[in-house]
Image: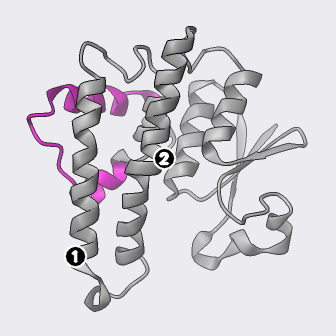
Amino acid sequence: MIKLYHYPLSTNSRKVRIALIEKGLEFERINIDLSKKEQKNPDYLKIHPFGQVPALDDEGFIVYDSTIINEYLEDEYPYPPLLPGDSEGRARARLMEDFRDNHFNPHFIEIIHETRYKPENQRDQKVIDQAVAQIVKCFDRIEKELEGREYLAGAFSLADIAFMANFELMERFNIPVDSKYKNARAWIERLKARPSYAASAT
């Protein structure tokens, strides 16, 4: 059976959980508690040399980094497909996943570092406010990419899955999606209605 080394609160861990559930794959969840720094244990470093989550063990083959894991799952278990069949569509999905990984998700990590690991009187509200502003700004591009489409690459794909992993944090941190982003707001509701969204929460 597939083993997923993950931390329930990690957005990148959830990204892989969603993909596994969408593929209909059975997998064992192995919790690596980041709050206890279990990711730095020598045994886990043999699985993930950089001491991060997630990592996946598929019958002895180990792969890490959430984007690479999901690409592996798409190659190894191609049905149902989570990337478009045409090269342009696949490139579009990968571009949007890269946008999420490098321009959207990092600002959530900034907020988490301020709110989860610091006493309230030591939090830098300016850092939090700037991170929220950058997250909201990302919806300019998301809105344009969704023009005339239900999903970022046309059909539901790994690009949408990547963003799904952050929706719960948006609610927790009270990050609004302005009413002017009609395409994005409808897209978020479509994604949250997928069974994999609730099933991937832990």
Taking 131 as reference, is 66 left or right?
Answer: right
Please, which residue is most extreme toward the left here?
A: 179
Q: Amino acid at mark 2?
A: Asp
Q: Main secondary structure of the magenta part?
A: helix
Point out residue 192 in the picture as x, y percentages from the top left corner. 34, 34
| Residue 120 in the image: above or below residue 25 | below
Image position of 40 with respect to 199: above or below: below
Q: Nearer the viewer, residue 137 or 177?
A: 137
| Residue 151 in the image, given as x and y percentages of width and height | 36, 21
Q: Is residue 90 left or right of residue 63?
A: left
What residue do we see at 63% from left, 78% from top?
36
Q: CA distance from mark 2 to mark 1?
A: 23 Å
Query: Can you identify the residue that label 1 sits on?
Result: 126
In the rendering, at what x and y percent does residue 126 appear?
22, 76
- Left or right of 194? Residue 121 is left
Which color scheme is applied?
one colour
Observer-nearest of 162 and 31: 162
Residue 192: mark: none
Q: Which residue is mark 2?
A: 101
Q: Secondary structure at mark 1?
A: helix
Secondary structure found at label 2 = helix
Q: Residue at x 67, y 64 (%)?
A: 32
Q: Is residue 187 magenta?
A: yes
Q: Residue at x 82, y 57 (%)?
A: 47
